[in-house]
């Protein structure tokens, strides 16, 4: 039998898997992200970077590092806004993307070349273990929902056997995690602790800002689901576990061709970072985080320096980021700092 986490890892990261192939995000893809919705998402984070540097916590020579960059839009948006607000910083900051897949690296380099020519140097690393620096600002958008997970129900966990799903007895590690985090039904992510520890070792001093959808605490239910062509399929509705199967599709039809994800349990993530020696600087909804970072001030600059039509067009995009019925409350932000 194969643990579900191994099956999910193969789905997303194995040979010819979903994230190994370049994927469109947005209207042509399987889902939208904050990055694909508005450049002011990256702009707000750029304002946070400047604030952290001006406070003295990070230096003007620190590394700005994105993890899970896709085409590189977020980091590029951040650079554009740093240029607008504090252009001198571009002479000293270093820009890095953590990207293990060659196809994505090629696309990111081309996008940076098209956007900045030779004015911005972009460096790639395969993983955080390769990084050693004095200070860094890490940023990630929707990466923790893509960590493989175990799926548990009371004293059982999900396995794959002969291309069929079945619940069987918890192994010792999953039983320990279930008890430690009080999760008795739902998803237990695998790898948060190692990821946090590697980040801690990679920089002497850092701040890490990450956005994802989920809740502060486990809700004691399944959230595992598949995204395909902007349709959402609860995972178990695609299996024989569904008592009244109303969806005429099976989960194996989506294997490696669609995204599979789950809600992030931020309490789990926070405790993983605290174990690594980091502290939680702040936790909030995406709406609150972007406003605290300075989104309103950036929109005021736009209003003063653009046409009414351009301003209104951008406001409509920003609404997707902050409207409580869209991304504003559904998505959360956690900010960690080294101690």
Image: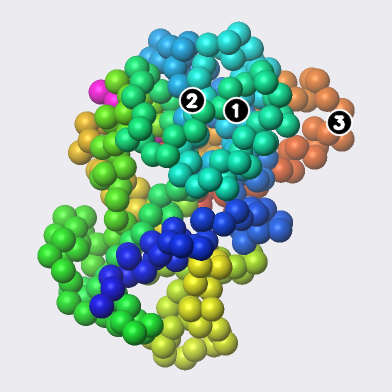
The span picked out in magenta is 335-339
* Residue position for label 2: 64
The prevailing secondary structure element of the residues shown in magenta is strand
Describe residue 157's horizontal placement relative to residue 45 as left or right: left
Q: Is residue 54 visible?
A: yes
Q: Alpha-carbon neighbours of circle 2 within 10 Å: few (<14), some, or many (≥20)?
A: many
Would you identify the image quadrant in which residue 134 lies? top left
Q: Residue at image x 16%, y 61%?
A: 173
Depth check: 76 or 305 in front? 76
97 is higher (above) or lower (below) than 300: below
Mark 1 or mark 3, whichever is nearer to me:
1
Q: Residue at image x 51%, y 67%?
A: 256
* Residue position for label 1: 78
- Residues tagged 2 and 1 counted as in contact (Cβ below 8 A): yes
Which quadrant is the N terminus positioned in? bottom left
Depth check: 181 or 258 in front? 258
Describe residue 282's horizontal placement relative to residue 98 as left or right: left
* Residue 191 pos. (x, y %): 29, 51
């Amino acid at each position: 039998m194969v643990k579900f986490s191994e099956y999910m890892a193969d789905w997303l990261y194995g040979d010819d898997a979903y994230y190994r192939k370049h994927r469109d995000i947005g209207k042509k893809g399987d889902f939208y992200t904050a990055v694909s919705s508005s450049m002011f998402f990256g702009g707000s984070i750029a304002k946070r970077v400047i604030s952290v540097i001006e406070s003295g916590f990070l230096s003007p020579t620190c590394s700005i590092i994105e993890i899970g960059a896709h085409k590189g839009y977020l980091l590029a948006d951040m650079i554009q806004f740093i240029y607008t607000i504090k252009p001198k910083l571009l002479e000293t900051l270093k820009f890095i993307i953590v990207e293990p897949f060659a196809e994505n690296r090629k696309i990111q380099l081309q996008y940076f070349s098209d956007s900045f020519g030779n004015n911005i140097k972009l460096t790639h690393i395969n993983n955080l273990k390769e990084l050693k620096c004095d200070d860094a600002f890490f940023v990630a958008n929707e990466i923790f929902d893509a960590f493989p997970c175990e799926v548990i129900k009371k004293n059982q966990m999900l396995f794959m056997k002969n291309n069929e799903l079945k619940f069987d007895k918890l192994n010792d590690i999953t039983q320990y995690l279930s008890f430690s985090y009080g999760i008795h039904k739902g998803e237990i992510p695998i790898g948060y602790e190692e990821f946090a520890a590697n980040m801690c070792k990679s920089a002497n001093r850092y701040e890490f800002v990450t956005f994802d959808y989920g809740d502060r605490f486990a809700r004691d239910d399944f959230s595992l689901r598949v995204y395909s062509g902007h349709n959402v399929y609860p995972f178990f509705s695609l299996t024989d576990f569904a008592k009244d199967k109303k969806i005429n599709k099976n989960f194996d039809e989506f294997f490696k061709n669609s995204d599979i994800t789950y809600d992030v349990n931020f309490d789990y993530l926070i405790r993983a970072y605290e174990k690594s020696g980091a502290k939680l600087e702040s936790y909030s909804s995406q709406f609150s985080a972007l406003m605290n970072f300075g989104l309103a001030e950036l929109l005021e600059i736009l209003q003063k320096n653009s046409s009414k039509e351009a301003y209104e067009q951008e406001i409509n995009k920003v609404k997707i980021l902050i409207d409580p019925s869209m991304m504003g409350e559904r998505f959360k932000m956690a900010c960690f700092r080294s101690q």
